């Protein structure tokens, strides 16, 4: 069982607020709401003079929303910023959001906190129809409380059907809090998003059971449908320098925060490889056989101006450091060209590289799953194929 407030009966008398031992009742716009701290103890039920607080079956569609699903129409993207600059994942979300909005015949909205109008204009050029911008310095540094409260208010006012955010440390930190307060579902770490042709529901696709299957998850009974998307798995949309849209400068008063960000310390890493920014990646798996195989791959990477990647199997064997690992438990990459040499193509690896522009696979097994996503496939021994590729590339580049 769960406890809800019928908004059509609530008079905002606040009698219930003090009765809750878990601080689970809060006032919003003169009405009582049950937040994520509710334990369904029902202490508040008898104290409400209007009978507005009721029990309902867990999992039942909320009857107190005051609106129908038809009122929830648009797609909303939370555009993350870092040091005042829009994070790359935001542009990827706009590409996915634009596709979903066009499919639904709705608008694409974006929320940008802590940046300036120039950054908001960039979101419009990347596909947003309307941007809700708040440049208040309080949002310059990320804080769970203030970010959740601001996004919650916009969602309640605009009633989007779909809400998307990046599965980054920021998104993973506060988006679940927003979903809990809205009492709706949230699917984390999605690698693909589609619209169900019959129902119009959002199909949220992500690896499950340790990456052994790809699960398609629906949220048919609640709105909005919320998902966080893994960075670098979605393609950016089309950039239009002349595109125009609406930018709404908004402010938030009376935002309460129980915490204060005193200082942000950036991690200093000595890792020289940057797979995220690489245009060409030459990756090896268990089929590379060891140091000898990766020596051949490094020669190919040097010839094409790329960097070395690896599957988890190769990292677990100690052939390459973890910083080179691509896949579900490593890095998600989106290069222009991805060489997969001696990699069978387990789903855990595919979710980290399948959005690459061009995938070139080399494997002795013609039935290897990697060929299902490859743009070009070569069936053969990588110890023969890779040196031939390297030699031919050097020849074309005029190298000895």
Image (spheres, rainbow, N blue to C red):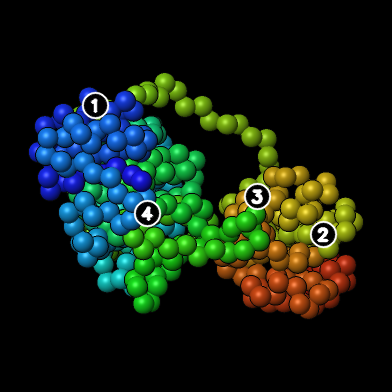
The quarter holding residue 215 reads bottom right
The 10 Å Cα crowd at callout 3, few under 14, some 14 to 19, many 20 or more, is: some
**Callout in the foreground (3, 1):** 1
157 to 100, vertically: above or below: above
Which residue is tagged 1?
A: 19
**Callout in the foreground (1, 2):** 1
Q: Position of residue 120 (x, y in %)?
A: 29, 49
Quadrant (top left, top right, bottom left, bottom right) of the C terminus: bottom right
Label 1: element kind:
loop
The 10 Å Cα crowd at callout 4, few under 14, some 14 to 19, many 20 or more, is: few
**Cβ atoms under marks 1 and 2 closer than 8 Å:** no
Query: Which numbered disc covers residue 286?
Result: 2
Which residue is tagged 4?
A: 59
**Cβ atoms under marks 3 and 2 closer than 8 Å:** no
Q: Position of residue 94 (x, y in %)?
A: 38, 59
Q: Residue furthest top?
A: 262
Which residue is tagged 3?
A: 329
- Distance Cα–Cα, label 1 vs label 2: 61 Å
Q: Residue at x 34, y 60 (%)?
A: 221
């Amino acid at each position: 069982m769960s406890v809800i407030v019928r908004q059509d009966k609530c008079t905002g008398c606040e009698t219930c607020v003090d009765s809750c031992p878990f601080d689970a009742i809060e006032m919003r716009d003169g009405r009582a709401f049950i937040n994520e701290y509710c334990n369904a103890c029902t202490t508040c039920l008898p104290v409400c003079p209007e009978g507005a607080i009721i029990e309902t079956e867990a999992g039942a569609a909320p009857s107190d929303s005051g609106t129908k699903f038809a009122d929830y129409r648009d797609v909303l993207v939370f555009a993350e910023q870092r040091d005042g600059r829009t994070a790359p994942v935001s542009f990827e979300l706009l590409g996915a959001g634009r596709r979903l909005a066009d499919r639904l015949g709705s608008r694409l909205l974006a929320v940008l906190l802590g940046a300036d109008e120039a950054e908001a204009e960039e979101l419009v050029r990347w596909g947003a129809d309307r941007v809700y911008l708040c440049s208040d310095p309080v949002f310059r540094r990320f804080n769970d409380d203030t970010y959740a409260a601001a996004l919650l208010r916009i969602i309640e006012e605009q009633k989007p059907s779909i809400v998307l955010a990046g599965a980054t440390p920021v998104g993973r930190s506060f988006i679940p809090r927003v979903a809990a307060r809205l009492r709706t579902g949230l699917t984390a770490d999605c690698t693909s998003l589609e619209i169900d042709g019959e129902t119009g529901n959002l199909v949220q696709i992500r690896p499950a059971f340790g990456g052994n299957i790809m699960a398609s998850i629906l949220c048919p009974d609640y709105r909005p449908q919320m998902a966080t998307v893994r960075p670098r798995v979605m393609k950016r949309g089309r950039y239009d320098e002349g595109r125009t849209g609406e930018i709404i400068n908004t402010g938030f008063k009376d935002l309460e925060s129980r915490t204060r960000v005193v200082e942000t310390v950036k991690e200093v890493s000595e890792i020289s490889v940057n797979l995220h920014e690489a245009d060409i990646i030459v990756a090896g798996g268990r089929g590379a056989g060891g140091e000898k195989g990766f020596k051949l791959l490094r020669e190919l990477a040097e010839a094409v101006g790329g960097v070395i990647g690896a599957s988890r199997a190769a990292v677990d064997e100690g052939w390459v450091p973890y910083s080179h690992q691509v896949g579900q438990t490593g890095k998600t990459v989106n290069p222009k060209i991805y060489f997969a040499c001696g990699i069978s193509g387990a789903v855990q690896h595919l979710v980290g590289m399948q959005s690459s522009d061009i995938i070139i696979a080399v494997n002795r097994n013609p039935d290897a799953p990697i060929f299902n996503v490859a743009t070009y496939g070569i069936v053969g021994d990588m110890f023969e194929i890779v040196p031939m590729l390297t030699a031919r590339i050097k020849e074309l580049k005029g190298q000895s």
